[in-house]
Image: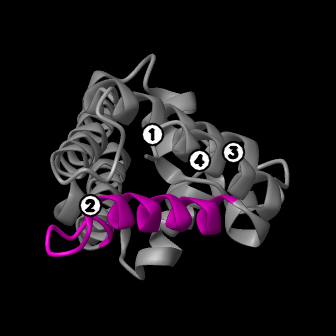
Amino acid sequence: MNVFWSSGYHATSLPDLLEATQLSRGSLYAAFGDKHGLFLQALDRYIADALARLDVELDPQKSPLAGVRTCLDGYIARTTGAPGKRGCLLVATAMELSGQDPEVASRIRRFFAELQSRLTSALTRAKAEGEVAADVDPGAFARLLVCLVEGMRVVGKTGLEQETSEAMVQALLDRIDL
């Protein structure tokens, strides 16, 4: 996963993968089929890790709005400084492959839909509990949050400052607070 994340799909060579996995060519092909199969499994792992982290951040046992804030704070941390410059495997893959690889495009669409769904659920709970303004549309606001955080991933590659990210997130959250 880290080799693809660092180099991108097309720039990752078979020798790079053999070195990273410590497998022989035959073992790599037996285990994953080919480079594309290995990449899809790496992408699936990345997505599973991201969704598991999101489920912890949006823990239904906590205040829903606090969970959304925790989620957004995590994105701020991942989009600024060294982590921000490294970028996001999912966003990089979307830019590199989604237009030409239906399997990849499907996985990316599914991740964004899951992210939006989880945020919508949290915001729906927040609205029901009176944590956000009554006129907030949880689904529409969740779509906006997905665009914000994924945009932060792209801009983070350029050296986005933490204060800038914090200000963007706060400006958006100010629109739904009571």
Q: What residue type is labelled 1?
A: Ile
> Circle 3 is placed at which residue position?
168
Residue 1 in percent (x, y) is at 44, 64
The residue located at (73%, 63%) in the rendering is: 80
Q: Which mark is residue 64?
A: 2
Direction from residue 117 to residue 136 in the image, left or right: right
Q: What residue type is labelled 4?
A: Gly
Q: What residue type is labelled 3?
A: Met
> Circle 1 is placed at which residue position?
176
Residue 15 in view (yes/no): no
Q: Residue 90 carries which label?
A: none
Q: What residue type is labelled 2?
A: Pro
Of 175 and 122, nearer the camera is 175
Q: Earlier in the sequence, mark 3 or mark 2?
A: 2
Of 32 and 121, nearer the camera is 121
Helix, strand or loop at mark 3: helix
Q: Per the image, is 52 magenta?
A: no
Q: How far apart are marks 4 and 3 (CA)?
A: 29 Å
Indicate which label's residue lies in the foreground, 2 or 4.
2
Question: Few, some or many C-alpha atoms within 10 Å of disc 3 (few <14, some 14-19, many ≥20)?
Answer: some
Which residues are drawn in magenta? 57-79
Q: How far apart are marks 1 and 4 (CA)?
A: 37 Å
> Circle 4 is placed at which residue position?
8
